[in-house]
Image: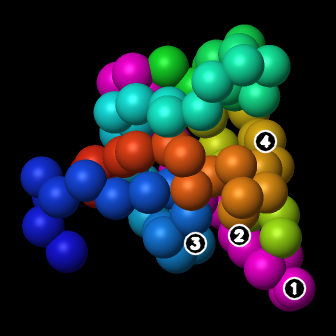
Amino acid sequence: MDKNEILRLDQLKPGQRCKLIDVNLTGADGQRLMDMGFIPDVEIKVIRNAPLVDPVELEIRGYNVSLRHSEARYVEVNLL
């Protein structure tokens, strides 16, 4: 994968780091992600995927957060 390639957060594997480009989710769900710190240029690390795929655990801005893959697919990122 190219570092400049735009990926979705749900495509990353544990241990990978990325920089957030955009959240393509509107309404209350999009606002909730922004309130949790999902804003452009923030660095995200994928910690682990749950055994049955959902949720994915992420480290963002010094704390851990879990998202459903259905939410993570709306977050565009670049690998670091």
Tag 2 near tag 1, CB within 8 Å:
no
- The CA span between labels 1 and 3 is 14 Å
The magenta stretch is: 40-53
Q: Nearer the viewer, residue 73 or 19?
A: 73
Instruction: Identify whether 48 is placed above or below 67.
Output: below
Residue corresponding to mark 2: 48
Q: Position of residue 51 (x, y in %)?
A: 86, 86
- The CA span between labels 2 and 3 is 5 Å
Q: Is residue 51 visible?
A: yes
The reply, left or right, for residue 60 in relation to residue 32 is: left
Name the N-terminal-most of marks 2 and 3.
3
User: Quarter of the image containing the N terminus?
Assistant: bottom left
Instruction: Identify whether 6 is placed above or below 38.
Output: below
- Labelled disc at residue 65: 4
Instruction: Identify whether 42 is placed above or below 4.
Output: above
Quarter residue 60 falls in: top right
Q: Nearer the viewer, residue 19 or 26?
A: 26
Q: Nearer the viewer, residue 38 or 43?
A: 38
> Residue at image x 40%, y 31%?
22
> Residue at image x 34%, y 59%?
7
Q: Amino acid at mark 3?
A: Pro
Secondary structure beneath disc 3? loop
- Labelled disc at residue 52: 1
Name, please, the residue furthest toward the bottom. Answer: 51
Tag 2 near tag 4, CB within 8 Å:
no
- Labelled disc at residue 34: none
Secondary structure beneath disc 4? strand
Residue corresponding to mark 3: 14
Instruction: Identify whether 61 is placed above or below 51.
Output: above
> Residue at image x 44%, y 57%?
8
Name the N-terminal-most of marks 1 and 3.
3
51 drawn magenta: yes
